[in-house]
Structure formats: structure tokens, C-alpha cells
Amino acid sequence: MKMLIEGLRGLGRETQAILTRLGFIARFFVALIRRTPESFVRASLTLREIYFSGVLSLAIILVSGLFIGMVLALQGYDILSTYGAGDSLGVLVALSLLRELGPVVAALLFAGRAGSAITAEIGLMKATEQLDAMDMMAVDPISRVAAPRFWGGMISMPLLAAMFSAAAILGAYAIAVPLIGMDSGAFWGNMQAAVDVRVDILNSIVKSLVFGTLVLLIAVFEGYDAKPTAEGVSSATTKTVVYSSLAILAADFILTIFMFRGV
Amino acid sequence: MSEITSDIANLTDVSFGYDESRLILDGISMSFPRGKVIAIMGGSGCGKTTILRLLAGQVTPRLGEVDFNGRSVARLSKKELYAMRRQIGFLFQFGALFSDLSVFENVAFPIREHLNLPEEMIRDLVLMKLNAVGLRGAASLFTNELSGGMARRVALARAIALDPLLMLYDEPFTGLDPISLGVVGQLIRQLNDALGTTSVLVTHDVVESLKIVDYVYFIGKGCVLASGTPEEISHTTDPFVKQFIHGEPDGPVPLHMKAPELSADFFGGAHA
Amino acid sequence: MKRATIDLWVGIFVVLGLVALLFLALQVGNLASVGREAKTYRIEAHFDNIGGLKPRAPVKAAGVVVGRVEQIRFDPKLYEAVAVMNINEKYSFTTDTLASVLTSGLLGEVYIGLDVGGSEEMLVNGSVLPRTQTQSAVVLEKLIGQFFLRESTASSGGK
């Protein structure tokens, strides 16, 4: 009986701790959003962050996209042609990329490449008292450090996701038409007939915006909240990758229910 | 009224603790007269740095008043607090230079953030500040190319960029070789007199700081244990201050942490 | 890194991103045809059974896509399925047009096929094709069931 009460009490404490942390993140998010205008008035700060989160992620995004598209084409054609539906390969590739793989995989790669870098950078600035120094110089670290990284990433993310999907579809085309010998007209024609601009492409962009918000909020927050030591920064970087991957997959499930059920 | 004009900052009966149970400062009062260099000394973890944070408004006292230039720091809004901090220079223990900016941009940072000046004027100002710390030649270097002493001096140049009324130094002498140490010490004194600011330094380097300061506070157990000019301090009879100045391992601050009798710890288990 | 270099790269990055979006919209999603699709008229067709027909399925005449299924619902009074279709304004069909639910291949996509009749009058926005003018989906399970029923009655009659 005593153990049960102890257990319940522990559970209560845990729940309270998690809720407190969520509340803290929410407050941080509000603070971040309220400093939005400053990141755009001083565009050079945000441009710099687009360079770091977007341009530097370009290579990994394009190469991964190309390979995923090629693999999808090879596997998809094998299975579809068993049922005599090889001509629908373009449909399979385009829909799976636009609806799921494009936004999700691009966001996962983004979390690993840009999210972890943002956390490490902000965490290091905290550990070496650079954030404190800024605060002491009457410069708000959230508007000078956190907000430009957030908005730079928010601009990069949907563009990266679109490039990922485009690279993958081109990769699939490169396998399907010259290599497998599919008819180019059937590949594009069936694809165009099945892909709806509003349902598929617009939702794809919405998904990548939602994932971008999650990854960047987690990355910036974990950096800001890191213990100011070497271990603290490294564990915060790990947390960013783990938490944002989980958040992306969970959010994807929820968004898919709202966007594509019954379509 | 005369108090307000002669002192740039005051602590009045200030109590502070980071958590509920333990008070780091317990009803401490200090005053910092204009134009002077004042040292705060005490053992590690006795709340020295906390005093600097209180003065800069980074933390607010649980009880008592902190005032700067005649205004209570705790009652300032965020905007007013930032306005106040423009008049305060803060030198961090390890410099806290921005690692993604060059030496020049580091010193230019507060100027660019707060003053809307043309580029040539910023250049002149930055080079002037760097010249004051003897590092004009290092303007184009990056922070990872600097030695510890140089980094400290660049940080000093950055801290004085906006000509502050009050300079706060957090352990300015830690980790420096004897030459750099002398250089930084001299710089603190010279800059204070040249710019007409007030300097507060937190340190445990007795020898170096007694050479340059006008007044010393010794703190411990949350309050001021002793204070006076360097002259008075070096002739003090206070056992704690004596132990601190001469670096004696045992005295009022015991070598051993409180523990059971040695014999009990070693043989207690076997006897039981 | 110089400001100008960063700006240049960011510029290239944003242009590449927009090109990718444009590619998705035009080449993959065929956005251009959406504009044309905007001018449509709506007709309804009543079916006994629509089988696997889904919203957004194509409506074809002589194999050419002329419109899309907008909505599918069940009429609780007539106990019939109603498919609402948007037909491109460029094409008009006679009022005695026959609509059937068809499947391309054995397992391919389900669509509505239109076969034009000989009437003088044309379908307009809001026209309804009653059940007599439609052909329901061929439901495989029913076919197989009927086949076995006939087989068993034939063999029992033979004895």
C-alpha cells in the first residue's frame, strides 16, 4: 500500500515536471514569435541563417532525394508490374513523395543536419557565456540569436522539402524511363492525372511548414536550455535529433488523418 | 541626497539565494563611490559573482535594495533595465567573446547594436578602443587565434565600447600568466581613470588587486566581514582576512570539511 | 564568409527552391489543367451500386478524361448511390447519355464512362441521369456467386 502511494506520488511528480516543461516551451515559443519583426527588419541576420540551415543542407537533401526516388522506382515497378499496373509507377512515386516521404524525410534530414547544428551553436554560446554577455550588453539574445535561426530555418524547410520531392521524382524518372523502358508519356500523364495541386502539393507544403516549426522550436529551445557544460551541449544536441524525429513522425500521423483520410 | 550623487551604486540589506533553502547573501550592504576601483574578495562560492549579477539586474534580490545611479534596479521594466545596462560594462571571467565574429566585429557589436553610426565612424571607434587595450594590430584576427590574455583584453575593449559609467569585472585575473596579469591589472586602473568610470572587480588574486584598487570588501557567510583601503587591509588583525591575504591553509576557514572524528571513520565500522 | 557570398548563395538556394515548387506544381501536379477545370458544369448520376468509385475519379468519354467525380453520396429515399460529376464546359453530352462505372484492367482505377446517345437536347448544369440511364459497377463477388449458383442448379437439374 505504501509502495503504491509512493508510486502514484512519483507519477504525479513526473507528470507535473513534463507539464511544467511543456508550458516553458510554449512560453519560449510565444517569446520567439513576438520577436519576429526584428528578424525581418534586420534581414541580414536571417539571411545568414538561411545560408547555414538551407544552403548547407542542400547537398544532403538533393542526394538523398535522388536515391530515394530511384529506389522507389525500382521497387515500385517490380511490385506494380506483378499486377499489370506498371504504368502507374509515376502515380505511386509522386503520391508517396508528395504526401509522406518528401516532407517527412526532408524534415528528418533537416533535424539531423541543421537542427543539431543550431542546438550545438546556441548551447556553446550559452556555455561560453556569450548569451549572458549579449544580455549584459542590453541586446536581447532571443531576438538576436534565437529568432533569426528560427525564421531562417522556417524559410529553408519548405524549399528543401520541395527540392527533395522534385529530386526524387526526377530520380524515379531516370530509372523508369531510360532504364526500365517505361513510356515517358505514361509516366508523366498518369502522374498528372492523379496528383491534385490542392490536396497533394499544398498539403505537402503545409506538412513541411509544421515539421519545420517543430524541429526549429525544439532545436532552438534545447540549445537555449542546455546545461552550460560540454556534456550539457552534447546531450542537448542528441535530444534535438531524437525529440524532433519523434515529433515529426507523430505530427505526420495526425496531419495525415486530417488531410488524406477518405481521399 | 549626497549619497546618491557620490555613489554610483549601493546594496542595502540585500538577501539573495538561488533556491529557497539556502541564502548566499544575507543582509549585505555595500556602497560603490564614483571614480573608484573597488575589489570584492572572498572564498570560492561565497556570492561574489552574485553581487555583480545583482548590480547588473540579472537577478533580483529577495530582500533589500540594489540601486544604480539613484534608481532601484529591481523596479525597472525590461526596457529601462536594458537602458541601464548600456551604461554598464561587464567583463566575463573568460571574456565571452562571440566565437563567430572577428576581433573587430566583437568590439563593434555593442556599437552596431545601439548606435546608428556610419561605417567609418564605427571603424574609428573600434580601433580607438582596441588601441586602448594595445590590440589594434589584432583587429582582423578571429577569437580562436587569441591567447587567454589577449582575449581578456579584447573583451575589455568590447566592455568599454559604449563608455560605461560602471565597469564590472568577474575574476579578471584568473588563468593569466604573470605578464598578462600585470597588463590587465594596469589596464583596469588606467581605463578607470581615463574614462572616469567606477570599477568593481571580483577576485581572489590578493597581490595583484591590492596594487590597483582604492577600496576592498571581504565577504563571507553572506555578509561583509571586513572592508577598508589596501593600506588598512594589509595591516589588519582580523584572523579571516589575515588567513586570506597570506594564503594560510588553516585558520578560521578550516582545512577539513566538517566530518566525524578520523578514528571513528576508519575504525568505527570494525568496532561496531 | 563574406556578406555578399552568403547573399549570393541564399539567392541561388531560394531560386532553386522556387524552381522545385514550380516543377511540382506544373510537371507533377499539372496546375495548368486546373485553371481549365475551373469552368465546369455539374451533373448527377444515380447508380444501383458504384463499386469502388471514389471522389476525384476521372470521368471519361471514349477514353478521354472530360471531368471528375466531385462527390459521392447515398440517397436515403431511393436507396441509390448518387455520383456528382464536374464536366468540362468544352464538352457537352446528350440528355440520353449512358453513364457506367468501369474499371481499367482487372485491378486498375475505377472511373465513370459516358456513352453518348442520339437525343437533340444537351445536359446542362444540374441535370440528373436516372438509374435507367446508368450501368452499375460489376461487382466481382456477385458475379462469382451467380456463376456458382447457376453451376449448382444446372448440375442438380441434370441428375
Image (cartoon, coloured by chain):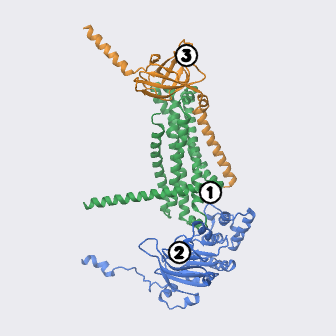
**Residue B204 image position (x, y, % from top left):** 53, 79
* Residue at the disc numbered 2: B49
Residue B234 in sight in this render: yes
Residue B129 left/right relative to A253? right
**Residue A193 position by quadrant:** top right
Q: Please identify, in this view, whether the residue under mark 1 or under mark 2 is nearer the observer.
A: 1
Q: Position of residue B55 (x, y in %)?
A: 56, 74
What label does residue C28 carry, if any?
none
CA separation, marks 2 and 3? 90 Å
Crowd band around label 1 with a 10 angstrom C-alpha radius: few (<14), some (14–19), many (20+): some
* Residue B208 makes an appearance in the image: no
Q: Residues within 10 Å of mark 2 (few under 14, many from 20)?
A: many
The structure residue drawn at horizontal position 65% and vertical position 43%, both measured from the top left corner, is: C15
Mark 3 nearby-residue class (10 Å; few <14, some 14–19, many ≥20): some
Which numbered disc covers residue A38? 1
Looking at the rendered structure, whether the residues under marks 2 and 3 are on a common chain is answered as no
Using the image as rendered, state which of residue C157 and residue B20 is in the foreground: B20
Q: Colour of chain C?
A: orange
Report the side of C155 relative to B142 (left or right): left
Is the residue B247 above or below the residue C121 in the image? Answer: below
> Looking at the picture, which amino acid does disc 3 mark?
Thr
CA gap, disc 1 to disc 2? 32 Å
- In terms of secondary structure, where does tag 2 sit? helix
Q: Quadrant of the N terminus of chain B?
A: bottom right
Which of the two marks, 1 or 3, is nearer to us in this view?
A: 3
From the image, tell me which residue sits under label 3.
C94
Chain A appears what colour? Answer: green
Tags 1 and 3 in contact by the CB under 8 Å rule? Answer: no
Residue A125 in percent (x, y) is at 56, 62
